[in-house]
Image (tube, rainbow, N blue to C red):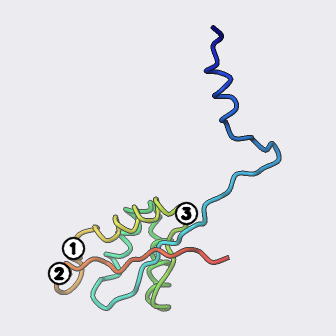
Amino acid sequence: MPDTRHATQARSRPKVDPQGKPRLLPPYAVIIENDDEHSFPYVIDALRRVFGYGWFKAFRLTMRAHVQGRAAVWTGPLEVAEFKRDRIRGAGPDFHARKPVHAPLGCAIEPVSD
């Protein structure tokens, strides 16, 4: 009796287009929002810890959020953006402020428009 397992599997595989290119997932931006409660040192420290930015880059992004009301601080795949957003929100209380702030820093993710 002939073994037909391999023949059946070969026919059920999708055809591969050698000219086809892999489809890239759309990027998402992590956005921080300005508020009057969190201090500059807290936001700068959070950006440095979560994204590994140097002090000057974290300061520039914090300043952009302060002036424009919000700032895109990172762009990449959705799953990583969600993870980084959650890390920013979970950065802990802001003890640099006059009164300790226990509310999370305003942070969202949005698809990057073309």
Judging depth in this view, the residue of 20 and 51 nearest the camera is 20
| Mark earlier in primary sequence (3, 1) | 3
- Horizontal side of 1 relative to 101 (left or right) equals right
Q: Could you tell me residue 73's position as x and y percent?
A: 49, 73
Q: Residue at x 63, y 13 (%)?
A: 3
Image quarter for residue 34?
Answer: bottom left
Measure how far apart labels 1 and 2 are at the Cα level: 7 Å
Instruction: Determine whether 70 is above or below 90 in the image.
Output: below
| Amino acid, disc 2 | Pro
Measure how far apart labels 3 and 2 are at the Cα level: 32 Å
| Amino acid, disc 1 | Pro
- Label 3 vs label 1, nearer the camera: 3
| Amino acid, disc 3 | Gly
Marks 1 and 2 in Cβ contact (< 8 Å): yes
The disc placed on residue 100 is 2
Marks 3 and 2 in Cβ contact (< 8 Å): no
Q: Residue at x 20, y 81 (%)?
A: 101
Q: Mark 3 — residue?
A: 76
Measure how far apart labels 3 and 1 are at the Cα level: 27 Å
- Horizontal side of 99 relative to 34 (left or right) equals left
Secondary-structure class at tag 1: loop
Judging depth in this view, the residue of 69 and 23 nearest the camera is 23
Judging depth in this view, the residue of 59 and 17 nearest the camera is 17
